[in-house]
Amino acid sequence: MTTRQEIIKELETINNTLANIVDAYGLLWDYISQQPQAFDALLQHDGLISVNHLAYDSLKNVADKTDALFYKLEREEREG
């Protein structure tokens, strides 16, 4: 696989990760908005904390992959 194809594949992975994050927060918001006591319940059961950790880990993964892609592109440009 060429570097360009690798970069495209990684960008697709990043896009999918971001879509999953958006979906997760959307589901959480839907749940909270439909349940008057949902926020308190989530805090009592660590649900909110777990979702936030998952979101953070996903965002960190995206940031790390983005950094790696920029590095690959810079290296490819330098090496011609």
Image: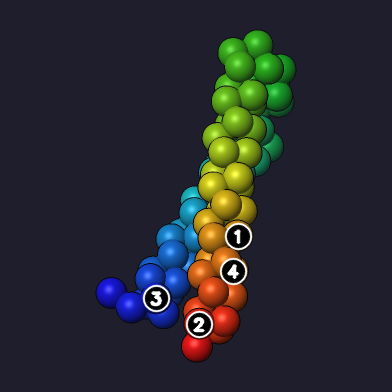
Residues marked 3 and 1 touching at CB (< 8 Å)? no
Across and down, in percent, residue 51 comes to 58, 32
- According to the image, label 3 marks what residue? 3
Q: Earlier in the sequence, mark 1 or mark 2?
A: 1
Residue at point 54% right, 60% down? Answer: 68
Across and down, in percent, residue 52 comes to 64, 33
Residues marked 4 and 1 touching at CB (< 8 Å)? yes
Amino acid at circle 2: Glu
- According to the image, label 2 marks what residue? 79
Amino acid at circle 1: Asp
Amino acid at circle 3: Thr
Alpha-carbon span between mark 3 and mark 2:
12 Å
7 or 13, which lies in front?
7
- According to the image, label 1 marks what residue? 67
Residue 21 seen in render: no
Q: Residue furthest front?
A: 79
Q: Earlier in the sequence, mark 3 or mark 2?
A: 3
Alpha-carbon span between mark 4 and mark 1:
5 Å
Label 1 crowd bin: few (<14), some (14–19), many (20+), radius 10 Å: few
Q: Earlier in the sequence, mark 4 or mark 3?
A: 3
Q: Secondary structure at mark 3?
A: helix
- According to the image, label 4 marks what residue? 70
The image quadrant that residue 24 belongs to is top right
74 or 7, which lies in front?
74
Across and down, in percent, residue 16 comes to 46, 59
Q: Secondary structure at mark 1?
A: helix
Asked if residue 36 is positioned above or below residue 12 in the image, the reply reads above
